[in-house]
Image: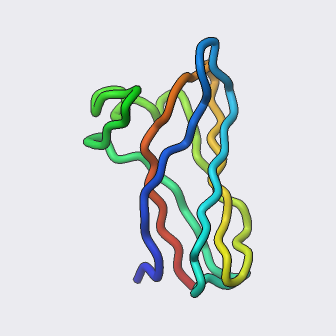
Amino acid sequence: MASGTGSLFIDFGNNPGSNEASVAVTGQTGISNTSKASAYVMSGDTSTNHTANDHKYLPVFAALTCSTPIAGTGFTIYGTSTQKLTGQWAVRYVWSD
């Protein structure tokens, strides 16, 4: 059972873009340093820079990982891509104990 869920945007920057990006997930007062966190992309999500179809294929080119949580605070989502990506992408997260 999920203890915390949410969504936010990870930004790979303007052209020419980057192979790496990160975004902090904060305000997770119930999270502990032993909680497990995961990030993922939903194919129907959109951002100001990318369509639902773009999001559908993002996992082909990029991986999302999460840092170890900081108790009472949150964690960081890291995006790493084989290609230089640009702009903001919608990502979702879930964490539980």
Q: How many marks?
A: 0
Residue 64 relative to residue 8: left or right? right
Q: Where does residue 95 sit, x and y in percent of width and height?
A: 52, 73
**Looking at the image, residue 73 lies above or below residue 67:** below
The residue positioned 55% from the left and 22% from the top of the image is 86
The answer to whether residue 11 is above or below residue 37 is: above
Q: How is the image coloured?
A: rainbow
Q: Is residue 54 left or right of residue 64?
A: left
- On-image quarter of the N terminus: bottom left
Q: Where on the picture, by quarter, is residue 26?
A: bottom right
Residue 70: quadrant of the picture: bottom right
Q: Please name whichever residue, 91 or 61, is drawn nearer the observer in this view of the structure.
A: 91
Q: Which residue: 47% across, 52% down? A: 8
The residue at the point 37 percent across, 27 percent down is 50
Q: Quadrant of the C terminus?
A: bottom right
- Residue 24 spot, x, y in % from top left: 64, 57
The quarter holding residue 56 reads: top left
Is 22 on the left-hand or right-hand side of 58?
right
Q: Residue at x 49, y 45 (%)?
A: 9
Residue 33 higher or lower than 56, as above or below: below
Between 34 and 15, the one lying in front of the other is: 15
The residue furthest top is 16
Q: Position of residue 28 (x, y in %)?
A: 57, 77
